Amino acid sequence: MNHRENLLRCVRFERPDTIPMIFLINPACWQHYPHDALQELMEAHPYLFPGFRASPTYTPEFSSVQRKDAPYLDPWGCVWHTSEDGITGVVTEHPLADWAAFEGYEAPDPDVTDGLNPIDWAAVRDALANDRASGRLAQASLRHGHTFLQLSDIRGYQGLMYDMADEEPRLRRLIAMLEEFNLAVVERCIAAGAEWMSYPDDLGMQVGPMIPPKYFRKYITPSYRRLMQPALDAGCVVHMHSDGDIRLLVDDMVVSGVEVVNLQDRVNGIDWIAGRLAGQVCIDLDIDRQEVTVNGRPEDIDALIREEVSKLGRREGGLMMIYGLYPGVPLANAAALMDAMERYASFFSQ
């Protein structure tokens, strides 16, 4: 079966041929590893990099928030800085650090921006149509950090927490403004032909969520539900991503209509994920980037992937896996992980 059918069968627990696997190489890696070595690994793993061919002239592209010594003013008025090309920076200047600036503050125009970068909706339509024509699922997404992180970037994290605790009335107005913009982006993605809508918004820390569950339910979940409803109405797969420990928030996320939950493995706990989510909702597992793949041996990496597949997967489906390679991981470990992802992709179909 093609990519589209295999992915849909995985989400719907309808016996996919293989476990969908994605291996992403962060743009900063091309400054830390030999280009030929990275490309040799990619060519040697066609399941992860279908159709890839090495190029001696490959040049990585850095997004607007990944350029060293080039502060970026985004459409919401947030200023981003990064210390290394290819690594997404942080917001260092918040447009509403003082609520006095709220009067006259306006949302960007969704006809020309996704909230972070300029967008050409005609090009989006063409890209989604090409995906469908090529046997791939037409996938679209809100920008990373569309709601909670965006509020934190606009107000500053501490200011936002005080606003929620104090029931600051202007916060409700800001959330409504943000939601209206995000909804317009979602509607344009659906009109452009999206069959899958992603809603990435980091909510977790190393231990526990960044937002108390009671505030998440009060201020964020209702907006999530309204943003996801058009996608659900259109029959799109609804995918939610969050880094960090989100165990206290997962129930509210799933109630919002999420069909696929992308969460980190060892931060949340493989056994916890198995007990709470496996077989109930499709798991898009974010493979460890902190310990095993950085400091472990190749055999440790193989054992990790085998454990995750055997505990979280089902012959019926419901498991996909993703890994992001960043500088600092030995290339031998990257190779071992690629090998393991390709090996265990067919774990239930052998």
Image: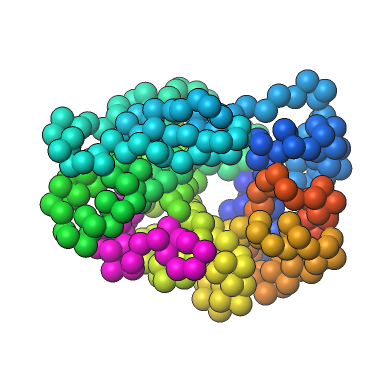
Residue 91 vertical placement versus 257 (above, below): above
The verdict on residue 214 being magenta is yes
Residue 232 vertical placement versus 14 (above, below): above
Give percent across and percent down for residue 33. 78, 37
Q: Which residues are magenta?
A: 203-227
Residue at horizontal 62%, vertical 67%? 266
Q: Is residue 168 left or right of residue 161?
A: left
Nearest the camera: 1 or 102? 102
Residue at horizontal 13%, vertical 34%? 103
Residue at horizontal 65%, vertical 59%? 290
Q: Main secondary structure of the magenta part?
A: helix
Give percent across and percent down for residue 92. 40, 38
Q: Quadrant of residue 268?
A: bottom right
The verdict on residue 38 being magenta is no
Give percent across and percent down for residue 5. 63, 50
Q: Is residue 334 left or right of residue 211?
A: right
Q: Does any portion of residue 189 appear in the rendered image? A: no
Q: Is residue 346 left or right of residue 101?
A: right
Give percent across and percent down for residue 29. 71, 38
Q: Does any portion of residue 268 appear in the rendered image? A: yes
Residue at horizontal 18%, vertical 35%? 101
The quarter of the image holding the C terminus is bottom right
Q: Quadrant of residue 109?
A: top left
